[in-house]
């Protein structure tokens, strides 16, 4: 019985470890981090809390969506009031705490926001 339980625990541990490092099933997403802010872009890979994105924009400030969830589903209804700087070709985020898949309509909306510059 003890060996059976140990085998089950090893199987569960193995499944959890593979889940932590498997690539996401969606490409364009919004990633909220613990301290680096919020990014929208293509998710390349994820390992635990570390996320690699390409063609990503920091979502410095948004309007026309009550939450990131609404922004991911519908986009923004006030693109002129958003502050989204230019895309970076690649970014590695080390403390991802939320990953939201983005609908095609929301992706178009986010990408249509004019580049914010200081």
Image: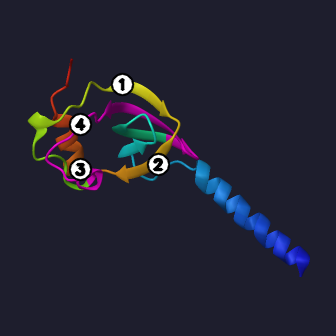
On the image, the x and y values in percent for residue 94 come to 53, 36
Q: Residue furthest front?
A: 35
Q: Residue furthest top?
A: 118
Secondary element under disc 4, as helix, strand or loop, is: loop
Give how far apart the Cα atoms at labels 3 and 2 are.
17 Å
On the image, the x and y values in percent for residue 96 come to 48, 44
The residue shown at (49%, 31%) is 92
Give how far apart the Cα atoms at labels 3 and 4 are.
12 Å
Residue 61 is tagged as 4
Residue 12 within the magenta-colored segment of the rendering: no
Quadrant of the drawing holding the N terminus? bottom right
In the drawing, does residue 73 fall left or right of residue 40? Answer: left
Q: Residue furthest bottom?
A: 1
Q: Residues within 10 Å of mark 2 (few under 14, many from 20)?
A: some
Read off the magenta span: 45-72
Residue 97 is tagged as 2
Give how far apart the Cα atoms at labels 3 and 1 are.
20 Å
The residue shown at (43%, 27%) is 90
- List the residue tagged with mark 1: 88
The residue shown at (45%, 53%) is 25
Name above or below for residue 58 compared with residue 69.
above
Residue 71 is tagged as 3
Secondary element under disc 1, as helix, strand or loop, is: strand
Give how far apart the Cα atoms at labels 4 and 2 are.
18 Å
């Amino acid at each position: 019985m003890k060996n059976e339980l140990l085998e089950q625990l090893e199987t569960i541990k193995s499944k959890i470890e593979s889940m932590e490092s498997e690539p996401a099933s969606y490409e364009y997403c919004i990633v909220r981090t613990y301290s680096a802010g919020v990014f929208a872009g293509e998710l390349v890979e994820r390992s635990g809390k570390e996320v690699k994105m390409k063609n990503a924009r920091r979502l410095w400030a948004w309007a026309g969506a009550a939450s990131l969830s609404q922004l991911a589903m519908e986009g923004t209804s006030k693109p002129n009031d958003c502050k989204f700087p230019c895309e970076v070709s690649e970014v590695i985020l080390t403390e991802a705490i939320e990953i939201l898949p983005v609908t095609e309509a929301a992706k178009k909306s986010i990408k249509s926001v004019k580049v914010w510059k200081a």
